Amino acid sequence: MERLTAVTVDFDTSHLLFPGIITVVLLLLGVMILIQERKRIAASGAYWQAIFTRMDKLRFFGTLAATLLYFCAMVPVGDIWPNTGLGFLICSVFYVFLVGMLFLHQRNRRSVIPVVLTALIAPTLVWWLFTELFYLTLP
Amino acid sequence: MKHFRKTLVAALSVATLLAQPLLVSAQELPRNVRLVIGSKSTGGDTYQNSAIVAEALAEKLGINIKVDAVGATAAFKALARDKRGTTLMIFHDQSYLGLLYGQKGYDNPFDTYKIGPTVAINPGNAYLVPKSSPYQSMDDILAAAESGERVRVAIQPGGVSEIGFSAMKNAARLRKAGSEDNIVAVNTGSQSDKNQAMWDGLADVINGSIQGNEQFTQLPEDDHKAMRFVWITARAATLEQAPEAGMGNTTRDDMLQYSSPKVSVAFDDSNDFTFDKEFFFLYNKEMDDAIVKQIDTALTEVFADGAIQERQKAAFFIPNFLPSDAARAHLVEKSDTYRDVISQITAQ
Amino acid sequence: MEFFDLISPLFVALVFAGTVVGIVFGAVPGMTATMAVAVCLPLTYSLGLANGLALLLGLYVGGISGGLVPAILLGIPGTPSSITTTLDGHPMSQRGEGETALRIGIIASLVGGLISLLILYLFAPTLADFAIRFSYVEKFLIILFALTVMAALSSNLLIGIFSGFLGIFISLIGTYDVSNGGNGEYRLIPPGTEYWLDSGFSLLPVLIGLFGLAAILEEAEVGVPEGQKADDIKHDQQRKFSLSIFKGQLTNLTRSSCIGTFVGILPGVGGSAASILAYSNAKTFSRHPERFGKGEPAGVMASESGNNGLTGGALVPLLSLGIPGDSTTALLIGAFTLQGIQVGPLFIGNNPSVWNAMIFAMLLANIFMFVVMYFAIRQVARIVTVPKQILFPVILMMCVIGAYTINYGIMFDVWTLLLFGLFGWLAIKLRLEIAPFIIGFILGPSAEVYFVKSLESFGDLSIFFTKSWIAVLLWVLIVASVTGSVLLSRRHARDNGAD
C-alpha cells in the first residue's frame, strides 16, 4: 500500500527540489505582503521622492562611484606587478583619500592633513601586514 | 615622529618594489608566483602536497610562491586569465575525472591547459565496510551483487570518490552482466557524511581513505563506529614505496593485503583495476615553453637532491616525479582507461 | 612525551601571541578566526605539534571572541558568529553604553569558553558517540529550529519571514555543491552569469556588505553627521560596572554555553548557528522577550557565551572522530597531519599528553582573552570617537581585504561586497529586515542538504517526526519558539494599536 507521505527524490534533479519549495513560499509571502501593505506600496512613489530630495547626493553617489572605480582599477593595476598586492596598495591610497575628503565637512589644512596621513599610512600598513607577514594574496 | 618613520619605511619598501623591472621577461617564472589549487581546504591533501612542492621549487629558483586554496573552478579561471606564468596550478586526477563524469565547470584539461610534471601520489583511496558487516572482502560484495543482493556504496559523486565505485560496477558486470545494477550509489559529500551514512545504516560500503579511516578500523567490533578495509585502490607498486610502518597500527604489509593483486576488482579479463591519486601541475595553454622547461629542470634537480621525498613520505605521500612530457602521456593514457570503465557501465 | 615536557615558556608565550593576534583578526570587520588560523598554519610546521597547537588554539579562541568588538561598537559583526551580538550590543553602544556591553560580552565569552572546555575535557568521547546519532533528519530539525529565530527577530512578522526566505533563496544560487552531498548542477543562475555565479555568493562578503558597506552608505546618504563625542562615552566610563547585571542570568549563560558547545559538536551544522540558537532560546525563555533587539544585555550574553561555547564543542568531533566541527577546526586537522599525527577515535588514548596540552592551551587562551580584552576596553571603546572621515574609508578598505582573502584571492567576492552593500541600503529603505535575511542566508544551504538528503534516504515525509526521540524533542522546541514569536508579535501589534 502506498503511504500518503511517501516521496521519491531523484538525485539527478534533486538540485531543483529545495529552490522550488522556497520559491513557492516566497511568492505566497510576497502576495500576502502586497495585500497587507497595499496602502504603503501605493504611496511608495512619494516615499522614494522624499528619500531622494533629502539625500546628500554628492556624498552618497560619490561614495558609490569611488568604490566602483576602486574595484575596477585594482586588478588591472595589480597585473602590472603580478602577485605583489601593489594594485591593492596603490588604489587603496587614492580611495581612502578620496572617500575621506568626501566625508569631510570643512576642508581646511587642519582637517585635511589627518586624512592624507591616513590615506598613506593605513593602506601601507595593512598591505605590509597581509602580503609580507601573513603571506596572503592581494590584487 | 612615529608616523613619519612609518611613512618613510613604507615609501622605501614601495620604491624598492617599483624598481623591479616592470615587464617580467616571459621566458622565466616571475619573482612572485601564485600557485592555485583545485581544493578549497588548506587542511587537505592537495594543499599539503602543493605546499611541500611550492616550498622546494621556490627555494630552488629563488622566487616566492604563494599557495592559494581557491577550489577547482576558481583555479581554472585564474589559470586561464594569465599566460605570463604568474599563475600556476596543482591538482589531481579530478581535473579529468570531473569531465568524464560530466561535472559542471570542468573542461578537457589536455586540450585547455598545458600539463606539467606529476609530483606525488596519495595512495590512500580506500573502501570500507562496518566491522560487523557480513562482507569479508570485495569478492563477497561482488558475489552478493551477482546473487541479486543490493549493495549500497557511499561516495561523493563526480570524481575521485566515484571512480572506484564505477570500477566495482564494471567488475560486477564482468562477473555477470546485469549484476552491476545491484551496486548502487549513496550520494553523500564529505568524509564525515560518508562515515555518517554507514553509522545510520544507509550504506553497506563507504569510500574513505587510509589516513582518515585507519583509526576506525582499530576499534573493537562491538563499537558502532568500527570499520574494516575491504579495498585500497592504489597499485601494489605504489604502496610498496610507502613507509614500512604504514599508518597508525596498519603496516605496509597489511595495506598490501587489501590491494591488487590480493584483492581483485577486475578491469577486464586479465587485469585488475587500480587507481593512484596523482598530483600534477597545470599551466595556461599559452605559457612560454621556456617556463615549462625551467620548472621541469628545477624539479628534476629538487627530486635528485632527495630531501623532498623525505618530507612527502613523512606526510604519507609517495614521491612520483615525471617531467611534463612523460606526465602528459601518462595522464592521457590513464584518462583513456577510466573513460573506458565509465562508458562500459553507462552504455547499456 | 610527558605533559610537563610539552609545557614551556614558549608554549605559554605562543598561546598569548595567538590569542592577541586572534582578537585582532576577530575585531577587524571581514577578518575571521578561520583566516587567522589559515595564515598561521604554515608556521606550525617548524614549531612542533604542541607549540603549533598552542598558537593555533590561541588564534581560535581569540578570533571567535574578538568579533564582539566591532559588533557592539560599529554594528558590523567582525565574524559571522557575532551577528546576534550586534542585535543588542550595537543599540547599547548607541545609547552610550558601549563599554558596558563590551564588558558583558567579554565576561560571557569567558564563561562560554570555560564551560565548553570543561565539557570537552570530561565528556569528549561520550558526546561524540551521541553526536553521531544525529542523522540528516535531526540535523535538518536543528537547522529548522535555528531558522525559527527569523520569526523571533522580525519586527513585522510577515516581512521578517519574507526577508528570511529571501535570504535562503539567495543562498541557494549557484551549484548544488558536490562536497556537501549535492549533484553539482546549477540552479537559480540568470542566463549569461554562470561564469561569476557558479559558486554562488560567499557568506563573508555578503555579511560585511550588508552590515559594513550598507551602514556607511546610509551615513553618506544623510551627509555623514559628526559622530559620538568623547563626552558621550565618558558618562558610561564613569559609571561603575557591576557584576549585578548578570543577576538572574546564570541560567541564560549556562544554557547558551551548552547550546554553543553542542552545536559545535555536531559536524556540519556550522559555527554561526551556535550563537543564533543560543540567542533565540534566550529570547524564547526570557521574561522580557520584547526587549531583545533593542539593547538587552541578556541578548549579548546569550550570543557571546554561545559562540565561545563553540570553541570547545567543535574540538569534540575533531579529537574523538577526526571530523571537524566547524571551518576553523577543519584547518586544525592540517596542523596534525603536517606533524604526521592521525586524528580519529584513538587520538586521545594514543596521545594523552598532547590532549592535555591542548586543554591547557585552551584554558590559557580563554584566560588571556579575558585579561587582554578586559583591560583594553577603555581604549577600544574610544574607536567610536574616531572621526568618520578617517574611520569609514579604513573600514571599507578592511572589508575589501576580508572579502578578497576569505577564499584566497577571488575578485568576485569583492564585487559581492558592493552588490550586497547596495542591496542592504535598498533593503533598509524597503523595510526588509536584515537580521532574518542574513540568518536565512547562513542556514539556507545546510537546510537544503539535510532536507533533501532526509527525503532521498528515507523516502518518506513522516520520517521528520518518527526518526527518533531527538526529532520529537526538537519539534517541541520548534513549536515553542514559533508560538512564542507569534504571541509576542500579536501583543506588540496590540500595544501599538492601543497607542
Image (spheres, coloured by chain):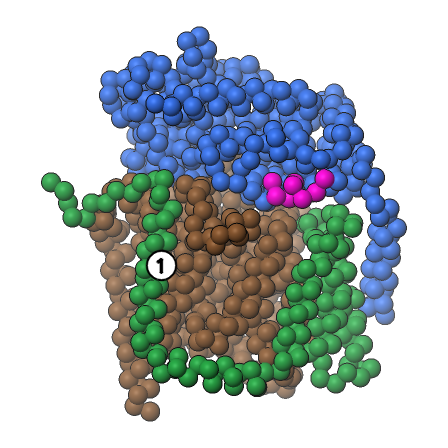
Where in the figure is residue C147, as x and y percent of width and height?
36, 61
Range shown magenta: B76-83
Q: Is residue B82 magenta?
A: yes
Quarter the C terminus of chain B occupies? top left
Residue B216's place in the image compared with B43, above or below, is above
Left or right? Give the position of C183 relative to A107: left
Colour in which chain B is drawn = blue
Left or right? Give the position of C162 relative to B4. Answer: left
Residue beneath label 1, please?
A23
**Which quarter of the image is occupied by the N terminus of chain B?**
bottom right
> What type of secondary structure mainly makes up the magenta span?
helix
Q: Is residue B341 left or right of residue B336?
A: left
Q: Residue C153's quadrant in the figure? A: bottom left
Does B255 appear above or below B77?
A: above
Q: Would residue C448 be seen by someone viewing this image from the given angle?
A: yes
Q: Residue at horizontal 35%, vertical 31%?
A: B185
Q: Residue at x 66, y 52 (%)?
A: C13
Counting from the top left corner in percent of width and height, residue B119 is at: 65, 26
Tell me if residue C469 is in the magenta stretch: no
- The color chain A is rendered in: green
Provide the letter of the chain coloured brown.
C
Specify the amino acid type for callout 1.
Answer: Thr
